[in-house]
Image: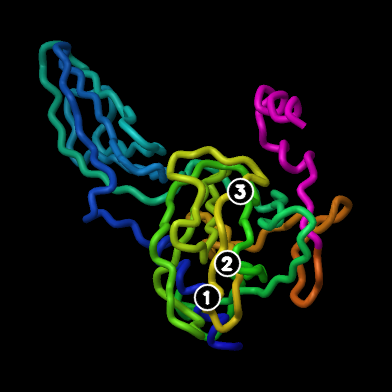
């Protein structure tokens, strides 16, 4: 295995495994009402969804038993988690609580059969290279694991959304400038959250070349930004990965629309032509969104 293949996927690991409790990404607070009720809220200024686990080691005179554990997925802003009501009126609720949170919505189930579009312009000829990781990083010495695709591009190509969703993270000013590099710990990227709980990460955009912002809703085939990476040893390319925190190996290799009549996983050394069939673009849209999209075609 070539070292550069291993290094490609090292960039994935922190974003998937880390849950930075000390960074205060999520705050849980509570309010008391005149009726003695206690309402718990979780608040975040991140567009990335988080799953909050709220537990009560001590709980008396409450509508829930001691030891209650409540789990909820939260999003940007303030979300109500739980309301404790007194079992006996005019007697205060006694409680202690603690909470943890994890990146992602763990209440959803990843659809590993979903078919993605190629993230390049319609009609563009493309080739892919697999990105690998050594699973010893995750405690499995000596095994290799596919973590994503490197799409060959020409510097200045526009990158398109392979699937619809909400933009959760953007880094737009960290493009490396070292010539002949194979790996950089920080690079420009766009991360998109999908309705089944998966995330897609698109990497190696030019500085200032990203068109979207956190909180934006994107549809399949929508432009995301301008690719860079021309200073890399491999030449300009897009690094594309799909991951889900609740999957065993965190990332998986999705199927793509290989042509208007064929879907599957692209093979290395094969040549493909990017197609964006309308049927694939609208497959997750609501009836209202489909009608609006089709009216513009």
Q: Nearer the viewer, mark 3 or mark 1?
A: 3
Left or right placement of residue 80 versus residue 291 in this view? left
Crowdedness of circle 2 by 10 Å Cα count: few (<14), some, many (20+)?
A: many
Between 44 and 206, the one lying in front of the other is 206
Mark toward the start of the polypeptide (2 vs 3): 3
Q: CA distance from mark 3 to mark 1?
A: 24 Å
Picture residue at 70% right of the left edge, 30% below the top: 293
- The residue tagged 3 is 223
- The residue tagged 2 is 239
Residue 113 placement (x, y as % from top left): 71, 51
Crowdedness of circle 1 by 10 Å Cα count: few (<14), some, many (20+)?
A: many
Q: Which residues are magenta?
A: 273-297
Q: Is residue 86 above or below residue 202?
A: above
Mark toward the start of the polypeptide (2 vs 1): 1
Question: In the figure, residue 43 lies in which quadrant?
Answer: top left
Question: In the figure, residue 272 lies in which quadrant?
Answer: bottom right
Left or right placement of residue 6 versus residue 274 in this view? left
Residue 243 placement (x, y as % from top left): 54, 58
Q: Nearer the viewer, mark 2 or mark 3?
A: 3
Residue 55 placement (x, y as % from top left): 27, 41
Residue 8 tag number: 1
Q: Which quadrant holds the C terminus?
A: top right
Q: Which quadrant holds the N terminus?
A: bottom right
Spot the residue most to the bottom: 2
Residue 57 tag number: none
Picture residue at 43% right of the left edge, 73% below the top: 176
Between 199 and 270, the one lying in front of the other is 270
The kind of secondary structure element at disc 3 is: strand
């Amino acid at each position: 295995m070539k070292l550069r293949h291993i290094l490609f996927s090292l960039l994935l690991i922190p974003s998937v495994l880390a849950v930075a409790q000390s960074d205060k990404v999520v705050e849980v607070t509570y309010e008391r009402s005149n009726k003695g009720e206690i309402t718990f809220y979780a608040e975040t200024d991140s567009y990335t969804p988080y799953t909050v686990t709220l537990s009560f080691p001590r709980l008396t005179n409450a509508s829930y038993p001691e030891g209650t554990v409540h789990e909820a997925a939260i999003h940007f802003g303030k979300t109500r988690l739980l309301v404790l009501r007194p079992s006996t009126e005019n007697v205060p609720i006694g409680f202690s609580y603690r909470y943890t949170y994890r990146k992602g919505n763990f209440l959803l189930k990843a659809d590993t059969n979903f078919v993605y579009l190629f993230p390049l312009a319609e009609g563009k000829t493309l080739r892919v290279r697999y990105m690998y990781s050594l699973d010893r990083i995750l405690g499995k010495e000596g095994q290799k694991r596919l973590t994503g695709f490197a799409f060959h591009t020409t510097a200045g190509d526009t990158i398109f959304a392979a699937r619809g969703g909400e933009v959760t993270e953007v880094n737009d000013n960290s493009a490396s400038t070292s010539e002949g590099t194979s790996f950089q710990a920080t690079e420009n990227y766009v991360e998109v959250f999908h309705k089944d709980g998966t995330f897609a990460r698109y990497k190696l955009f030019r500085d200032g070349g990203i068109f979207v912002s956190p909180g934006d809703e994107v549809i399949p085939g929508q432009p995301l930004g301008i690719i860079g990476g021309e200073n890399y040893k491999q030449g300009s390319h897009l690094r594309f990965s799909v991951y889900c925190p609740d999957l065993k190996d965190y990332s998986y290799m999705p199927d793509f629309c290989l042509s208007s009549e064929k879907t599957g996983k692209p093979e290395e050394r094969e040549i493909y032509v990017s197609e964006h069939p309308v049927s694939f673009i609208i497959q997750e849209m609501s009836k209202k969104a489909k009608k609006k999209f089709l009216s513009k075609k």
